[in-house]
Amino acid sequence: MRPLHENLARYLDPCAFDGRRRSKRNSDAAFRARKHATKQARAAIRFMLKPGNLDRLLASAAARKESPDE
């Protein structure tokens, strides 16, 4: 089973993880894209684990959902 950060990275940038054979130049670009997506995923997880951040995001989403569309 994959770790949470890897699953989130695959969701953020599926093209970087598609597993196609590539040229050397494109494989280097895909490697950098995978590395970047993994860093973003780890940062997002750290953000969600900090106290209060998830509650603020959920409250903000609920407020936007309740407000009438203009």
Image: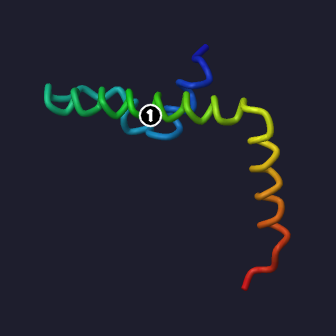
Work out whether residue 35 or residue 23 is closer to the camera in this orientation and state it.
35
- 15 or 57, nearer to the observer: 57
Q: Residue furthest top?
A: 1
State the image coordinates of residue 61 (x, y, percent, origin top left).
77, 58
Q: Mark 1 points at which residue?
A: 37
Mark 1 secondary-structure assignment:
helix
Q: Which residue is drawn at 38% across and 29% down?
A: 34
Compared with 21, 65 (above or below) is: below
**Amino acid type, mark 1:** Ala
Q: Where is residue 49 in the image (x, y as percent from the top left)?
A: 72, 30
Q: In which quarter of the image is residue 47?
A: top right
User: Seen in the image, is 52 located left or right of residue 29?
Assistant: right
Count all numbered tags in the image, as a single digit: 1
51 shown above or below 1: below
Q: Which of 27 and 45 is in front in this view?
A: 45
Q: Is residue 36 left or right of residue 21?
A: right
Q: Which residue is drawn at 77% across and 58% down?
A: 60
- Quadrant housing residue 1: top right
Q: How crowded is mark 1: few (under 14 residues within 10 Å), some or many (20 or more)?
A: many
15 over 69 or under it: above or below: above
Q: Which of 57 and 66 is in front in this view?
A: 57
Residue at 70% in and 35% down: 48
- Look at the image and tell me in which quarter the C terminus lies: bottom right
Q: In this view, does 59 lie to the left or right of 17?
A: right
The answer to which quarter of the image holds residue 51 is top right
Q: Is residue 2 above or below residue 52?
A: above
